[in-house]
């Protein structure tokens, strides 16, 4: 059986791994950041490889036949490392690239290139801000301590933000629109700060903000390397079948 390494950390990576596991020897790789990751149902390795060179060594040592980058669209470093390691080793690479959200009628989006720009976009006057960002990104908001912050993360934000007025929520998606609507109302939120993650699981807050006419400061996606890619698990699985042809391999 051909060996596939899936760089994961997303729901789609897990779904893809579960889909491929019957026909291929699949390993799912996680960064190891989340304290209690969701059970994956396939063999998992955890932790960084040591940059592009470490990943290249891993691909050679494990005789991996195909590398799949199914990481989150904001995980730009691992995606760059993956493209470079594939080039260094000659191992083919495919990516699962979830399309971003597009603003629709009624949305009040302000686009920001970075989290630093998102901080500036909030302006000088105190406002009530919902930060739906990873715990690594929220530290940037210490530069604007005049605001009230509601911060939601999968794992606790430690250390806490050095601002006088912040509340913390723990939660792992999917988040449904009615619940997000209730949350934004309950906390009297003026602005939602979000990444353009795409997909359904975290769109609820964007739809709820639209319904409530609340501004969304949307942090743009980072640059990702150009590699052959698909937008859905099904489309990527079809590309993989075409490339590695498990049926021919089984001699059927
Ligand atoms: P990143 O900045 O692109 O990567 C930082 C380093 O973490 C990489 O250089 C690599 O270390 C290691 N790493 C990242 N993903 C890995 C993986 N799947 N397997 C093994 N090592 C990995 O990534 P990040 O933004 O911190 O995200 C970390 C993980 O969380 C990713 O797997 C991503 O899919 C997931 N995630 C991220 C976000 C987000 O908003 N950024 C949201 C949801 C899930 P070495 O250089 O030592 O190999």
Image: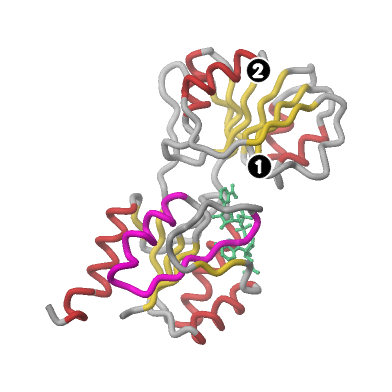
| Residue at point 50%, 59% (across, down) | 8
| Residue at point 49%, 69% (across, down) | 83
| Residue at mark 1 | 114
Instruction: Give the side of residue 150 with respect to residue 237, left or right.
Output: right
194 or 153: nearer the eye?
A: 153
* Vertical comparison of 37 with 42: above or below: above
* Vertical comparison of 206 with 214: above or below: below
Q: Which element type, helix, strand or loop, lies under badge 2?
A: loop
Q: Residues within 10 Å of mark 1 (few under 14, many from 20)?
A: some
> In the drawing, what numbered circle is on residue 189?
2
* Vertical comparison of 140 with 45: above or below: above
Count of numbered circles on the image: 2
Q: Which element type, helix, strand or loop, lies under badge 1?
A: loop
188 or 215: nearer the eye?
A: 188
Which quadrant does the N terminus fall into? bottom left
Corner quadrant of residue 142: top right
55 or 24: nearer the eye?
A: 24
38 or 49: nearer the eye?
A: 38
What's the colour scheme? secondary structure
What residue range appears in magenta?
A: 11-33
Q: Nearer the viewer, mark 2 or mark 1?
A: 2
| Residue at point 32%, 73% (across, down) | 24
Q: Residues within 10 Å of mark 2 (few under 14, many from 20)?
A: many
Tell me where residue 196 appears, x and y as whole percent: 52, 38
Tell me where residue 69 appears, x and y as whole percent: 46, 62
**27 within the magenta span:** yes
């Amino acid at each position: 059986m051909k060996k596939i390494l899936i760089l994961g950390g997303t729901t789609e990576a897990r779904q893809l791994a579960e889909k491929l596991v019957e026909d291929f020897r699949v390993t799912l790789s996680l960064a190891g950041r989340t304290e209690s990751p969701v059970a994956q149902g396939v063999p998992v390795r955890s932790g960084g490889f040591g940059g592009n060179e470490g990943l290249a060594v891993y691909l050679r040592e494990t005789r991996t036949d195909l590398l799949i980058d199914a990481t989150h669209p904001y995980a730009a470093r691992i995606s760059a490392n993956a493209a470079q390691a594939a080039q260094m080793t000659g191992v083919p690479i495919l990516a699962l690239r979830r399309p971003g959200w597009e603003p629709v009628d009624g949305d009040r989006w302000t686009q920001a290139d970075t989290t630093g720009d998102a901080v500036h976009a909030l302006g000088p006057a105190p406002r009530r801000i919902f930060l739906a960002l990873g715990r690594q990104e929220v530290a940037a908001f210490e530069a604007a301590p005049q605001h009230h912050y509601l911060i939601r993360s999968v794992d606790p934000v430690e250390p806490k933000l050095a601002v006088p007025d912040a509340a913390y929520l723990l939660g792992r998606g999917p988040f449904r629109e009615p619940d997000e609507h209730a949350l934004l109302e309950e906390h009297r939120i003026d602005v939602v700060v979000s990444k353009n993650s795409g997909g359904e699981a975290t769109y609820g807050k964007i739809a709820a903000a639209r319904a409530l006419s609340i501004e969304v400061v949307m942090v743009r996606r980072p640059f990702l390397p150009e590699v052959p890619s698909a937008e859905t698990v099904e489309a990527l699985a079809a590309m993989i079948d075409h490339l590695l042809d498990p049926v021919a391999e089984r001699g059927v």
